[in-house]
Amino acid sequence: MIHRLLIFSLILFISGFDNAMAQSGVSLPNASASLPFLSPRGSESQSSTAMPDPATGKPDPAAQMAWWSDARFGMFIHWGLYSVPAGEWNGKTEYGEWIRTSAEIPLEVYDQFRPRFNPVQFDADAWVRMARDAGMKYIVITSKHHDGFCLFDTKQSEFNIMSTPFKRDPMRELTAACEKYGLKFCFYYSIMDWHHPDYLPRRPWEKTRSSDGADFDRYVSYMKAQLKELLTNYGEIGVLWFDGEWESTWNEKHGKEIYQYVKSLQPGILVNNRVGAGRLDMEGLTKAGAFGGDFGTPEQQIPATGLPGVYWETCMTMNDHWGYNKADKNFKSTKEIILMLADIASKGGNYLLNVGPTSEGLFPQESRDRLAAIGKWMASNGESVYGTQASPFSQLKWGRCTQKLTATGAILYLHVFDWPSDGQLELSGVLNTAEKAYLLADPAKTPLRIKRQNDALVISLPERAPDTINSVIALYIQGKPDLTDPPGFQTVFDTFVDSLSVSLVSNRDNVQIRYSIGTKDPSSTSPLYMRPFTVKETTLVSARCFRDGKPVSGTVRKEFRKVAPRAPHPVRVEDPVRVGDPVRVGDPVRVGLRYRYFEGAWDSLPDFTTMKPVKEGITPGFVFTPRNQDDLFSFVYDGYVQVPESDVYIFFTSSDDGSCLWIDDQLVVNNDGLHGLTEKSGSIALAKGFHKIRVAFFERTGSDTLEVSVMSQTKPKQRLPAEWLFY
Ligand code: H79
């Protein structure tokens, strides 16, 4: 966790926190792009056949990934028995593909959806055409979701599409249509299975469903038999997309075995990281050292930056459900989706966008509308998405960039989200000679005027943007991109109490950093940055890279604000205090914290004020004792934290599931919600002495962790010491 945080902080500080998305009126998870020149592969490997490495005889991974990486855009389809209730059960309309478990529907009752699944309107040809017309290059469909229902003709279980009134194998029809339209056909397959008698564990609420005689090894054999069917009966499959791997019965050994098995059946196939057991929650990447398949799978989120050396694909719903939900009209706009696609491509990733068809076999109208609109954009601008690499710039004020290397230089695709009002598009930090530029949406490729202004290329644009969402300019440059990002501030804190040490760094060799105080751009005579300097008042610092006395990058600016610390509480102690020592002066505070322990099923932290705890008492720190059960509980810790000096403190909680931290009744860390191990942080200025602290944590199911850490300018990040805690 610590390493990850450091790397992420570094990337964030290098790239700054410019939020171009906010300016464009759309909020995307984050705005910065990737580090230069480190995308997984060169654009030269366009071949879709994986040639074995002549030295090792093993297939070359970059060549195997080539079709997928070039594709950039695919369709996810969630379709199954859950499409019949369409999200509704017992008057509630909040469900999706998880309905069997979320609404606690017994096996026999759920089985009643089978005679009602008859998608007579299903038209494989029309589905694949809608994907193709949207510009999507592959389709990943649920061959079996967590409910265990198989959407294909399997001999391994009765619980499949052939035992519905439909009696057709939609997978066979989709295979044919994908072949016809040139899309790669791919299968989603859930490891977790709430139907198969040998799958373990049972759902906690399935009290009457015995697990006597269940044999997980036999379940793995069942999986293999089904995977064999999927990989022999439907031609060439692009990807096997596993999911539902997080329960305790699945381990890395299973993952490696299944991965090898799948590859033995189709050597060219790609397998996502969820085949293993090392996924880091919804960020979707694999823990260091764990087995991670061929690519990472962020779910419902876009990484803040590119991930050099890592193949990844963000999967995302168009509304708030994967499976069809008739009540969910909360669809993302076409604009949001197009900007996300550009954002993802600029970070070197793929976008797998979901459709949840109805049980009649139709795509919801809202999805059809969006697919058609995206397709219109892709028809003019697809060149800036397919086969591109991550942006070479860390950030661009007006949008995003993707690139393709050519024999003589590169094409930079400038995705302009915010059309400049003065018609001048500035691209800072580019030393290459520009060859030409034109709008991708202009079939005549009318050249745009380009002029040089120090380190920047300035392109003159027509008054009106050709596209209201994202107009793309193809800019041809000579030679390998010679680009310089503005310097980055390495200082973690942007507020301080007394003084702050400010440090700068450039990711480019052979440049000098010059800085100035205030908004004026640093010039060749501004102070040369040699070592960290100290600010004692609120200060705006501007910095820029120079070479041979000439600016070679744009300017970065950051304000460091002096803030007043919150006054301490009138609690005094005599030094030295050791854990367990009673405190003798002032209010009667002692080392430790008060805790309250609750039981219940929550998706986020409830308001505990009116709730009666199951237990309460004193604890030395943030531990889960005493408790009665491993799941469905909550702890609230209250007391004082004694900070050693007046300073700005960053507090962190790392928890699975949700947690929040308050200091002096102010919410500092919001890490709430149902999630795997996730770290969040927040800062607050505190005067030396005692401050109220409260930490609340809840655990639904699965593994449980709560770690509370702290750092200040003078103290590196550490677990919040027990010696600082009092009640
Ligand atoms: O098929 C769709 C969803 O039904 C499925 N994945 C997408 C593609 C999905 N299953 N579960 N979830 C989404 C959310 C589950 C999250 C959690 Fe966990 C499971 C929280 C704790 C256990 C995964 C593993 C995230 C953290 C650890």
Image: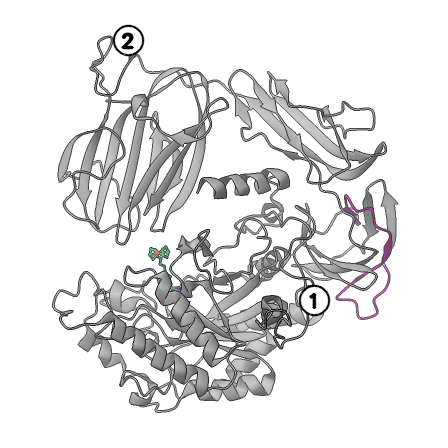
Left/right placement of residue 137 relative to residue 717 reads: right
Classify 366 as above or below 485.
below
Q: Give the range drawn in magenta.
A: 424-447
Q: Where is residue 585 in the image (x, y as percent from the top left)?
A: 24, 8
Q: How is the image coloured?
A: one colour
| Pointer 1 residue Cβ closer than 8 Å to ligand 1 | no
Q: Quadrant of residue 342?
A: bottom right
Q: Quadrant of residue 360?
A: bottom left
Of callouts 1 and 2, which one flags the residue occurring earlier in the amino acid sequence?
1
User: In which quadrant is the N terminus drawn?
Assistant: top left
Amino acid on which the number 1 mark rests in the picture? Asn
Secondary structure at badge 2 equals loop
Residue 322 shows up from this direction: no
Q: Name the residue under label 2.
A: 574
Amino acid on which the number 2 mark rests in the picture? Glu
- Residue drawn at x 33%, y 28% is 665
Classify 385 as above or below 153.
above
Q: Distance between the residues labelled 1 and 2?
A: 69 Å
Left/right placement of residue 324 relative to residue 631 reads: right
Q: Residue 381 carries which label?
A: 1
Secondary structure at badge 1 equals helix
